Amino acid sequence: PSKSKRVSGFDMAPPASAMLAGAAAVAAAAAGQLTGIPPVI
Amino acid sequence: CSRLHTKPSISPTLLLSNMYQRPDMVTPGMDPQGQAMDPRRIQEHFEDFYEDLFEELSKYGEIESLNICDNLADHMVGNVYVQFKEEDHAASAVQNLTGRFYAGRPIIVDFSPVTDFREATCR
């Protein structure tokens, strides 16, 4: 390990607010609504 | 490019889609708050990312090549290509990385058909 190593970004979960938005998007998708998620290029 | 990107079922090379996000991705040279960024800080940010990746991926096997697309245009933005010496080690990395997060975003990992980066072009 090097110097004063920063914390790795691995396993840094999304903020709770994003999790809620994600859950809402999943629920909306399940209900057959469009969620405005851009397609993967 | 036909966009018909094949995903092999096994390969020594992995693609981690859109994993690197430049700190000045919104406006080149500016942070998200619109403040000018020292180019050295942008470079450090990239190097920290590279170090995180190298450290994590080395847990699964010896790395032959680690390439990060540090671009701003949409195409392949932030894609990471890692080639292991052994297919088995790439497979282990897929198993271990699937479903995890990096910096608050899900890791999207697949096998990639690329084996020679000098010849790697979209056709």
Image (cartoon, rainbow, N blue to C red):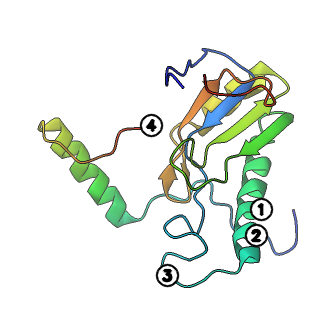
Q: Which residue is mark 2?
A: B44
Residue A38, percent across and down? 33, 45
Residue nearest the viewer, comparing B41 with B10: B41
Give the quadrant of residue B48: bottom right
- Identified at 54% across, 85% down, the residue is B35
Q: Amino acid at mark 3?
A: Gly
**Residues beneath discs 4 and 3 located on the same chain:** no
Parent chain of label 4 = A
Residue A29, percent across and down? 19, 39
Please tell me the numbered disc located at residue A41: 4
- Determine if residue B97 is in view: yes
Q: Nearer the viewer, mark 3 or mark 2?
A: 3
Residue A11, percent across and down? 58, 54
Q: Amino acid at mark 4?
A: Ile
Examine the rendered structure and indicate whether residue B61 appears above or below residue B116. Answer: below
Q: Amino acid at mark 1?
A: Glu
Please tell me the numbered disc located at residue B47: 1
- Identified at 60% across, 49% down, the residue is B78
Q: Relative to B76, is B67 on the left or the right?
A: right
**CA distance for labels 4 and 3:** 27 Å
- Determine if residue A6 is in view: no
For label 1, the crowd category at 10 Å Cα-Cα, with few meaning under 14, some 14 to 19 and many 20 or more, is: few
| Element on which disc 3 rests | loop
- Identified at 71% across, 24% down, the residue is B114
User: Pointer 2 and pointer 1: residues touching (CB < 8 Å)?
Assistant: yes
**CA distance for labels 2 and 1:** 5 Å
Q: Which residue is mark 3?
A: B34
The image quadrant where one finds the N terminus of chain B is: top right
Please tell me the numbered disc located at residue B29: none
